DNA sequence: AAGATGCACAACCGCATTGTG
DNA sequence: ACACAATGCGGTTGTGCATCT
């Protein structure tokens, strides 16, 4: 049974939004909230479909949108996150306050990808090109290398986390390192992604921490940077991993509580801080993407 | 000066997932 | 359990502007 269109097409405006439309939408949402996007246009008096209104709001009109060029730090973060998460723009955007998935997607497609290419780095794999060129898979790096990387990251992170935990006061609610934290992290999509970072899918996706863990579901995961494959456990379709995206680090690690939220941010940072193969030095050479590197 | 081309970004489309009755 | 509506997401396209010839 075919899906009905999200809105009735006839009479609805398409294309760029005008300032009056923006104003109407902003005023309406400020007054009433967006409520049901589907009914919003009618209620607000806009001749747009709800989807278009939602997109306009989330990508452009939202008050917390940070406009303007990306900073160097933001670009680095996007590249690092892309290495981990692949083309999961919403997940990446969730780690960059004020930036939208669309904006990041555009940044990647128009600037960062090219810059990586110019630097001889495959934007898909984040590996340096071999002589075979972009389409050639990077020289095979053993899966054990990932394990070693992960283990190093884990150890370093663990050390830092425990160090950081000393700074947390208020004992009853303080964030104390959960002994299973890294196990959960490993079993989360972040860990999954990490394992697949170089496309080195391995049959055994058990945690290096706990080989006994039986909860890990390998699924039909494809390489993060290549296929942007499913990462969530138990997924069987390429896009199913989205379910955990928006608060992926929160939702994936623990059943509940603020603790997971706090520690998830830390975990992300720890992962990002770990120098996998993200030599970002080339970014330092250019002030902005307006001045592309030598190519 | 005018047309061609390239680039950046906003917006759209279609599919997947989630929520609800 | 199922069907359907609503929403979210990623890929793609369209449009306007800048630069080149």
Image (tube, coloured by chain):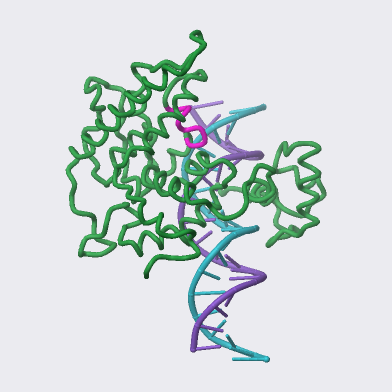
Chain colours: A green, B cyan, C purple
Q: Is residue A277 above or below residue A232?
A: below
Taking the spot 38% from the left edge, 17% from the top edge, the residue there is A178
In the shown orientation, is residue A290 left or right of residue A113? right
Q: Is residue A199 above or below residue A188?
A: below
Position of residue A81 measured from the top left corner of the image (x, y, whole percent): 41, 44
Quadrant location, the C terminus of chain A: bottom left
Q: Is residue A278 above or below residue A12?
A: above
Q: State which quadrant residue A161 falls in.
A: top left
Predominant secondary structure, magenta span: helix
Position of residue B17 measured from the top left corner of the image (x, y, whole percent): 49, 37
Position of residue A268 measured from the top left corner of the image (x, y, whole percent): 42, 34
Magenta-span inclusion, residue A250: yes
Q: In terms of depth relative to the viewer, which is nearer, A268 or A39? A: A268
The magenta region covers A245-252
Taking the spot 44% from the left edge, 43% from the top edge, the residue there is A239
Magenta-span inclusion, residue A126: no
Position of residue A244 measured from the top left corner of the image (x, y, whole percent): 47, 33
Q: What is the tally of numbered marks visible in this picture?
A: 0
Q: In terms of depth relative to the viewer, which is nearer, A295 or A252? A: A295
């Amino acid at each position: 049974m075919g899906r009905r269109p999200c809105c009735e097409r006839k009479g609805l405006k398409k294309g760029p939004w005008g300032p009056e439309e923006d104003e109407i939408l902003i005023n309406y949402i400020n007054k009433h909230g967006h409520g049901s996007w589907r009914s919003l246009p009618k209620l607000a008096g806009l001749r747009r479909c709800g989807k278009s209104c939602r997109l306009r709001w989330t990508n452009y009109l939202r008050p917390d949108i940070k406009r303007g060029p990306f900073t160097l730090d933001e670009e680095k973060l996007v590249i690092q996150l892309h290495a981990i998460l692949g083309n999961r723009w919403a997940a990446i955007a969730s780690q960059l306050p004020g930036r939208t998935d669309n904006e990041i997607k555009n940044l990647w497609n128009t600037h960062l990808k090219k810059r990586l290419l110019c630097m001889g780095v495959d934007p898909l794999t984040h590996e340096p090109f071999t002589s075979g060129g972009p389409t050639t898979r990077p020289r095979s790096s053993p899966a054990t290398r990932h394990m070693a990387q992960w283990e190093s990251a884990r150890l370093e992170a663990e050390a830092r986390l425990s160090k950081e935990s000393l700074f947390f006061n208020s004992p009853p609610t303080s964030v104390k390192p959960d002994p299973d934290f890294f196990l959960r992290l490993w079993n989360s999509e972040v860990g999954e992604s990490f394992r697949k970072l170089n496309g080195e899918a391995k049959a055994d996706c058990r945690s290096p921490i706990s080989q006994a863990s039986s909860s890990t579901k390998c699924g039909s995961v494809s390489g993060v940077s290549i296929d942007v494959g499913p990462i969530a456990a138990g997924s069987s379709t390429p896009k199913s991993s989205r379910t955990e995206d928006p608060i992926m680090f929160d939702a994936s690690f623990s059943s509940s509580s603020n603790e997971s939220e706090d520690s998830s941010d830390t975990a992300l940072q720890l992962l990002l801080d770990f120098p996998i193969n993200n030599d970002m030095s080339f970014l330092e050479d250019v002030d902005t993407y307006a001045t592309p590197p030598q190519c």
